Image (spheres, helix red, strand yellow):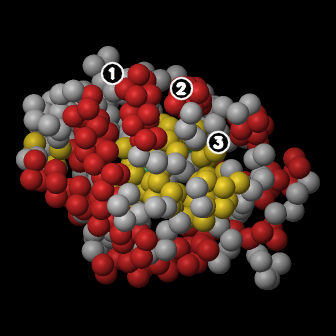
Amino acid sequence: MLFEKTKIRNLELKNRVIMAPMCIYSAKADGKVTPFHIEHYVTRAVGGVGLILSEAIAVSPEGRISDKDLGIWNDEQIAGLKNLTDRVHQYNCKIGIQIAHAGRKCECSDEPLAPSKLRFSDDYNMPKEISIKEIKLIKQEFLDAIKRSVLAGFDMIELHGAHGYFINQMLSPFTNKREDEYGGSFENRNRFLLEVIKEAREFYDGVIFVRLSAVDYEDTGFSMEDCINLSKELKKLDVDLIDVSTGGNSVNYTAKIYPGYQIQYAKTIKEKVNIPTSAVGMIDTYELAKHTLNQGDVDFVLLGRELLRNPYWVVNNAKKYENLDLMNQSYTRAY
Ligand SMILES: Cc1cc2nc3c(=O)[nH]c(=O)nc-3n(C[C@H](O)[C@H](O)[C@H](O)COP(=O)(O)O)c2cc1C
């Protein structure tokens, strides 16, 4: 199952191994793709993953985590991104974009933008509580980013709603203390994300993943119950998969970390909502990845740091454990 082809909506994937989104902090202030980005992603494409999820790519300069993030906030950035997707496609690999806004976790603004005036930690600048007009502006930035992603040749999009960035800040009662229609009740806190997807669906019928932190690890934060109920709403909007992670919205991190520690959350959401999910978090070995999929716990496995260490994880493990030679999938002509 791990190395067999599959399909999600109209997107055909040669296997169920996805490269997790990982910032590599290698862009310049213009947010454009550099030769290093091409080499980084093409290496993982050659290594055999079915789908690459890009690092968080910012919808605006203020939406960056750092000033070394890639951006998709202007049309001049499209050509570099198109070159990246073309090069990955040459190796028979699909690539999706993770679209993000850092909100209060922007480290390159004196006054980051956030749903509420609450600082992430003493090491971060105090954010400004944005107005409804500014919320609508950020929504438009997400929609423009989706349009540019299509022009740049990405095979799918993922909205980054996890790890304490802007969308997560909106969703969580721990970080969203607003008293208008974007804060307070569960419906209001979800409004931003659901509006982005609803409006995107008017012009984009491709694959959409949403990455969520299933829990904040805060008693007053976003809970598993919230995550299940939100996933039900996302399913109604034709979201294709919930990419399940945890944490990042609070400095209090109480999770016990062990291989596959987040699989339980993805499994529960799949069971309760009947929507495809993916699991991430120290899924480093063939045995764990295979077992997780064969059990039917989740639909895809995401590998992060292991692919930084070992870009050829797929071809190596396919050969070692299943005697499959997958190099010919990457080198369609030259091999
Ligand atoms: C260097 C690095 C950068 C990351 N950047 C992102 C990111 O841009 N977006 C995101 O959603 N998660 C990001 N993550 C989290 C990973 O996607 C993944 O969830 C996490 O590393 C756990 O998986 P792993 O144990 O396989 O590495 C990053 C992780 C690392 C190590």
Residue 243 at x, y percent in the picture: 51, 43
Q: Secondary structure at mark 3?
A: loop
Say left or right for 255 vs 165: right
Q: Which residue is mark 2?
A: 272
- Is 20 left or right of 6, judged from the image as shown? left
Residue tagged by mark 3?
299
Please determine whether, in this image, residue 203 is positioned above or below residue 235.
below
Whichever of callouts 3 and 1 sits on the residue coming sooner in the sequence is 1
Residue 166 seen in render: no
Q: Earlier in the sequence, mark 3 or mark 2?
A: 2
* Circle 1 residue: 218
Quadrant showing the C terminus: bottom right
Residue 128 falls in which quadrant of the image?
Answer: top left
Q: Nearer the viewer, mark 2 or mark 1?
A: 2
Q: Which mark is residue 245?
A: none
Q: Identify residue type, mark 3.
A: Asp
User: Element under label 2?
Assistant: helix
Q: Position of residue 230 (x, y in %)?
A: 38, 33
Mark 1, other Cα within 10 Å: few <14 / some 14–19 / many ≥20: some
Secondary structure type for disc 1: loop
- The crowding category of the residue bearing disc 3, from other C-alpha atoms within 10 Å (few below 14, some 14 to 19, many at least 20), is many
Identify residue type, mark 1.
Glu
Q: Is residue 192 above or below residue 261?
A: below
* Front residue (pair 270, 235): 235
Q: Is residue 217 left or right of residue 108?
A: right
Task: Measure how far apart labels 3 and 2 are at the Cα level.
Answer: 14 Å
**Of marks 3 and 1, the one in the foreground:** 3
105 and 10: which one is in front?
10
